[in-house]
Image (spheres, rainbow, N blue to C red):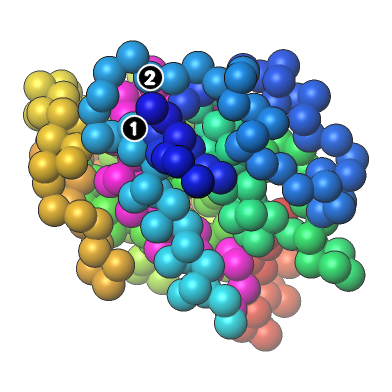
Amino acid sequence: MNVKKGSKVPDRIGRLPNPVATRAITPRVLQGFEPLSFAQFKEKTEWPVDDSPRWDSGPVMDLFAEAKRRFAQSAATASDAWLAPRLHYTLRLTRAEASDTELWNFLALCVAPDFVQWRWGKGQSGREVGQAARYSGRWDLQCFSRLWWAAELFRDGKNYGPAELACGNQDILNTVMRQEMIQHRPAAQALLRLQSRGLVRTGRDVNAAASVANAAGVTLVYEAMAPDELQDAEALREWILAAGDDPAVQYDTLPQGPKDGSVPHHAAETLTTWFEKLFADAPVRGKQLVDEEGNADNRDD
């Protein structure tokens, strides 16, 4: 049984085929005039073959409800930094599973379309979602996928602190996350260290630092300068299988991710020093004006 009696939402997380999702996201849906409901997708849903608690929809629905409550009086963008690590902790996936767009389709269209509208709604009504990709789209654009992957790429082993920092900057989420350098863990941590130490401050700074760092090397160059260590695949597997047994996510403190290995400190420091030198000579559009006025260009969309 995947839907509780009398409930309008599924109690399990399934997969919604891309063609079904694409057809459902009509202009009226995007404009906020046509609500989405699980009932219209029930017969098209593919359900998980195992009964692991990690496929329960209740915990993620609770997270979305809490995010809306906590950030009801502030910009919806502020919810990203809070939600990303907790979504990653709660929705325990392998990278292969997280690459499946049909899972994210299901979350956005069947479980929490109201959250997508709350997070991305604009216009006079506040209901209009500008891009269909926020419901069903590329991994770095889709409402929930982008947060899960940000937490995965920027966490330092079990420590979600760097991921929280990354998700507090919309330029990192919107631009930097797509760059090849982020696939190298020490490079990702080095960029965040520039930010946390105040060496880059504005959105323009972040984009400029990431651009010059990305242009200066590819993964092989980073690996030669600052070798990473292999992550512990067995520790990750055990963490995924512990879904339902580990403590429930805490709303006021960061959870702990999988103990699959931290980023080597010396490697991250080596790249931090190198990136700082590159950034010192990087052209930053409007840098002088921003520095004089102290304004941060922290764009949302």
Which one is in front, 161 or 278?
161
Direction from residue 45 to residue 150 in the image, left or right: left
Percent coordinates x, y for residue 9 in the rendering: 52, 43
Is residue 256 at least partly visible in the picture? yes
The residue at which mark 1 appears reads as 55
Element type where label 2 sits in the image: loop
Q: Is residue 39 above or below residue 284?
A: above
Task: Give, as a three-letter code, the residue at label 1.
Answer: Trp
Element type where label 1 sits in the image: helix
The residue at which mark 2 appears reads as 48
Which one is in front, 99 or 36?
36
Rendered residue at 42%/30% (across/down): 2
Rendered residue at 66%/68% (across/down): 297
Q: Is residue 188 above or below residue 94?
A: below
Figure disc tally: 2
Q: Is residue 47 above or below residue 60?
A: above
- Confirm whether the magenta stretch covers residue 81: yes
Direction from residue 150 to residue 56 in the image, left or right: left
Task: Give, as a three-letter code, the residue at label 2.
Answer: Pro
Residue farthest toward the bottom in the current orientation of the protein: 293
Location of residue 283 by image quarter: bottom right
Are there few (<14), some (14-19), or many (20+) residues within 10 Å of tag 1? many
Mark before the other along the chain sequence, 2 or 1: 2
Percent coordinates x, y for residue 156 in the rendering: 23, 46
- Confirm whether the magenta stretch covers residue 93: yes
Overall secondary structure of the magenta section: helix
Location of residue 218 by image quarter: top left
Percent coordinates x, y for residue 234 in the rendering: 10, 22
Q: Which residues are magenta?
A: 74-101
Percent coordinates x, y for residue 228 in the rendering: 21, 29
